[in-house]
Amino acid sequence: MKKLFLFLSASALLVSCSKVGKGEYIITGTAKGIENGKTIILQTQDPSGMGGLINIDTVKVENGKFEISGKVTEPSFHVLQLEAANQPIPFILESGEINIEINKDSIQNTKISGTYNNDEYVKFNEEMKVVQKKLIDFQKANTLKMNQAQQAKDTATINSLMGEFQKLQQEVGEKSKAKYITYSETHPKSLISALILQSMLGDPTADIKKAEKIYDGFEEELKNTKPGKAIKERLTAIKSSVPGAAAMPAAPATK
């Protein structure tokens, strides 16, 4: 009984030490080597659909650190824009404690961790690099050769390289597609899964039955995100437009 009491006390202490409550986030960032006063802007996609980014919050680097906190209703992609940096830092803003370690010399190598969806985003990107490595290696190995062939108007070399590249592109494309589907089938609460399925349904040749099966396996919290709701609407629209397909039942009336 004493051991149980100690365990429960320790669990309560761990919960109480959390810096954020439900629906809240805190971004704890390190920015070593970046001067004090440099601005970091939190941005998201303009909800009006105009295509641009809008500013959510702005902070300044102090002693190599920064912090941003606020409230969030569901996970979604946002970016951090560091003053004078050429590219933004994409991550998933969601409830929890998010850690971002900016690599000032290589923004794309910034480290992001701390919450489920961000950890999944990082792992997914690493796995996709492995899938696409053959294509990237080919490009690196043959860029100079292609440039020289173009300057010399060596059509035989150009056509040969293009032929090899297209074969590799098709091979990597098929492997990438298989990876996307496998991931969405096996990660029912990941935002990445919903975004994959949403993109998949934009392809007129998509396997609708497979898409429905994947969607049905999602956890309710994921289904209730914006991409989750968009998937549901798309599946309903597709089924209603197919001759002989049963219409989706209407949602029960709410009081």
Image: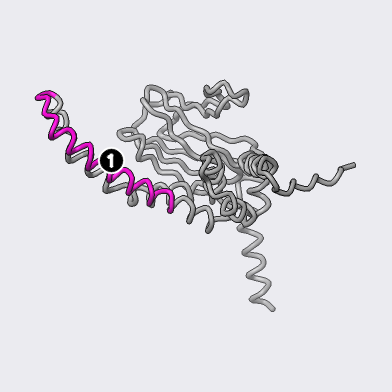
Q: Is residue 148 left or right of residue 107?
A: left
Residue extending furthest toward the bottom: 1
Q: Magenta stretch: residue 153 in it?
A: yes
Quarter of the image with the N terminus in it = bottom right
The foreground one among 70 and 224 is 224
Residue extending furthest toward the right: 255
For image coordinates 57% across by 21% down, the residue present is 50
The foreground one among 194 and 104 is 194
SS assignment at label 1:
helix
Quarter of the image with the C terminus in it = top right
Q: Is residue 88 left or right of residue 1?
A: left
Percent x, y of residue 208: 58, 49
Percent x, y of residue 224: 68, 45
Q: Magenta stretch: residue 242 in it?
A: no
Instruction: Name the amino acid, label 1.
Output: Gln
For image coordinates 65% across by 37% down, the residue present is 71
Residue extending furthest toward the front: 243
Give the labeled residue for mark 1. 166
- Which picture quadrant has residue 239? top right
Prevailing secondary structure class for the magenta stretch in the rendered image: helix
Percent x, y of residue 96: 59, 46
Per the rendered image, the range of residues in magenta is 151-178
**Where is 44 relative to 212, above or below?**
above
**Where is 177 relative to 163, above or below?**
below
Q: Is residue 109 left or right of residue 203?
A: left
The foreground one among 41 and 255 is 255
**Where is 41 relative to 171, above or below?**
above
Tag 1: Cα neighbours inside 10 Å, few (<14), some, or many (≥20)? few
For image coordinates 55% across by 50% down, the residue present is 190
Percent x, y of residue 117: 53, 48
For image coordinates 36% across by 34% down, the residue present is 107
